[in-house]
Amino acid sequence: MPKLLSINSFPDVKPYKSLENHQLQERIESVRRHLGSELLILGHHYQQDEVIEHSDLRGDSYQLSKMAAESKECRYIVFCGVHFMAETADILANRPDCLSQRNGNRVQVILPDLSAGCSMADMAAIDQVETAWADLGDVIDNSDITPITYINSAASLKAFCGKHGGAVCTSSNAQAVLDWAFSKTSRVLFFPDQHLGRNTALKMGIRENEMPVWNPHDDDLGGNSEESLANSRVILWQGHCSVHQMFQPEHVHQFREKIPDVKILVHPECRREVNDLADISGSTGKIIDTVKKAAPGTQWAIGTELHLVNRLQKEHPEQNIQFLSPTLCMCATMYRIDLAHLCWSLENLANGNIVNVIRVDDVTSDHSLIALERMLNLTN
Ligand code: SF4
């Protein structure tokens, strides 16, 4: 790769923090021009405007994984998202068929700030899931349980699902994945987001009392009786998204009192009490699409991450869009990806010093890929 002589990259991000936004923006664009099609910047919808403006492609977790899977020319993916998304991109962009087309050359995946994690993903650790699986096996037959992990999880959990006949799901295809699972087993272990699992299963007619919640910090069958596990259809992991958990039923009631024709639009990571009251519940992609297709003048109260709702307000002045909660619910970890980190990682890359590479080991990748390919093949 040719060097960028005009750029002095620094090993530390600190000097970039003192630059003005317009300087960072110019320097980011300069690297993008220099690297051309070798570089693909992916931006999650929850990113700040000033960051997502520099992305080649934007999407939710599902759309971004598909983009990573389809990338042909690029040699570097800079992922403006969180850690589990960069892991997924590494697995999909470097799957065996892609590697052989590129004569074994890997796509390097870079996360501009390594501290951009996901609190929900952190709520299910692989050793906790393995313990739960073993404990469940003492009470019910493991071969009659399909493990399903939401894409918002570490690669080790995706690998666990691949190894045990399970799959990854997203908020857009969770129902299709559960349907597939029930075509082969009578039970599902769903992690890490209890709300997506519960809201999806309820839509399919599964009753709340058939969905015990597994508390990974309770050594006694996750806090469940043998009977409740024996009668279960979906065993839900006790995890949640700290952003979507903030929306409450009273927020919905307050909006309906104030604006009787308001449409409540929420993400299925919201708790059941909010999801049940909403007019429409759907993935980030569905939320964006629903607003885009609505009649001008529609009144919306939207329950999802703040940056996305603010962007929808800007991009759709013909709609009346408000944020569902009176308090700010934004994803603090996504917010860690700022212009300074993006510029720092790009300039180092352009100078041949690749920083913050996310690389999933081969064994974990191979098993994860099985579960991810099932996800990509199953649509609602
Ligand atoms: S919004 Fe929630 S689930 Fe998404 S990355 Fe942030 S903490 Fe994780």
Image (cartoon, rainbow, N blue to C red):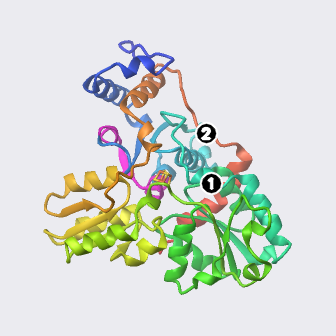
Q: Nearer the viewer, mark 2 or mark 1?
A: 1
What's under tag 2, amino acid-wise?
Answer: Asn
For residue 34, which quarter of the picture? top left
On screen, residue 354 above or below 146: above
Lower sequence index among marks 2 and 1? 2
The residue wearing badge 1 is 123
296 on left or right of 138 = left
What range of the chain is rendered magenta?
50-66
What's the mark number on residue 306? none
Residue 127: percent from left, percent from top: 76, 53
Which residue is at the front of the view, 249 or 148?
249
Q: Residue at x 37, y 47 (%)?
A: 57
Q: Is residue 182 above or below residue 53?
A: below
For label 1, the SS is: helix
Looking at the image, can residue 75 be seen? Answer: no
Q: CA distance from mark 2 to mark 1?
A: 38 Å
Report the residue marked by disc 2.
103
Q: Could you say where residue 355 lies in the image, as x and y percent from the top left?
A: 54, 27
Residue 10, image x, y percentages: 46, 16
Q: Is residue 305 magenta?
A: no
